[in-house]
Amino acid sequence: MMDRFRNELILLVALLVMIAGIAYRYTLSSRLDATVRTSQQAAREVREIAILKQVWGTQGIQGKVAKLRELLPAARIKTFDQKKSELRAVFSGLNGAELNTIATALGESPLRIRTMSILRSGQTYTVRCRCTW
């Protein structure tokens, strides 16, 4: 009986091997494509990090932080401690326009705001912030 279907059996085994080879090739190709995509994404991120390091370098940021002090009168600034890559500041007795000015300046600056609290007492505001870069 085995001799009778010998050619069909060989053909069936060859067909199964061919289908397995195609499936293997397809999965290998999709894995390669995924690897290429992830390495291209990583290269893009490295380039972006290099560009951001140039743009957000600490030398320029320290000058921008110093300009924050010039936005308000000295009487409104309680503390303004700028050490290495950290700023701790307390602004008190601010009216609405001054609060808006300092909040906008902090938001547009290249600082990472760690903590910021705004306290209202009557018509004046007190702002405490801690920022790093």
Image (tube, helix red, strand yellow):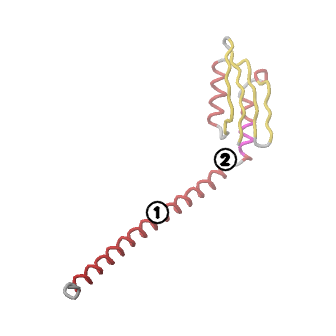
Start-end of magenta stretch: 60-65
Tell me: 104 left or right of 6.
Answer: right
What quarter of the picture does the N terminus occupy? bottom left
Distance, label 2 to label 1, CA atoms, is: 32 Å
The answer to whether the residues at label 2 and label 1 have Cβ atoms under 8 Å apart is no
Camera-side residue of 32 and 5 = 5
Name the mark on residue 56: 2
Question: Picture coordinates of residue 111 (x, y %)?
Answer: 67, 39
Please name the residue shown 32% across and 77% down the image: 18
Under circle 2, the secondary element is loop
Please name the residue shown 79% across and 24% down the image: 78
Question: Picture coordinates of residue 28 (x, y %)?
Answer: 43, 70
In this rendering, the answer to whether 49 lies above or below 6 is above
Per the picture, the main secondary structure of the magenta-coloured stretch is: helix
Under circle 1, the secondary element is helix
Q: Quadrant of residue 125?
A: top right
Question: Picture coordinates of residue 19 (x, y %)?
Answer: 32, 74
Camera-side residue of 28 and 110 = 28
Taking the view exactly as shown, the residue that stands out farthest to the front is 1
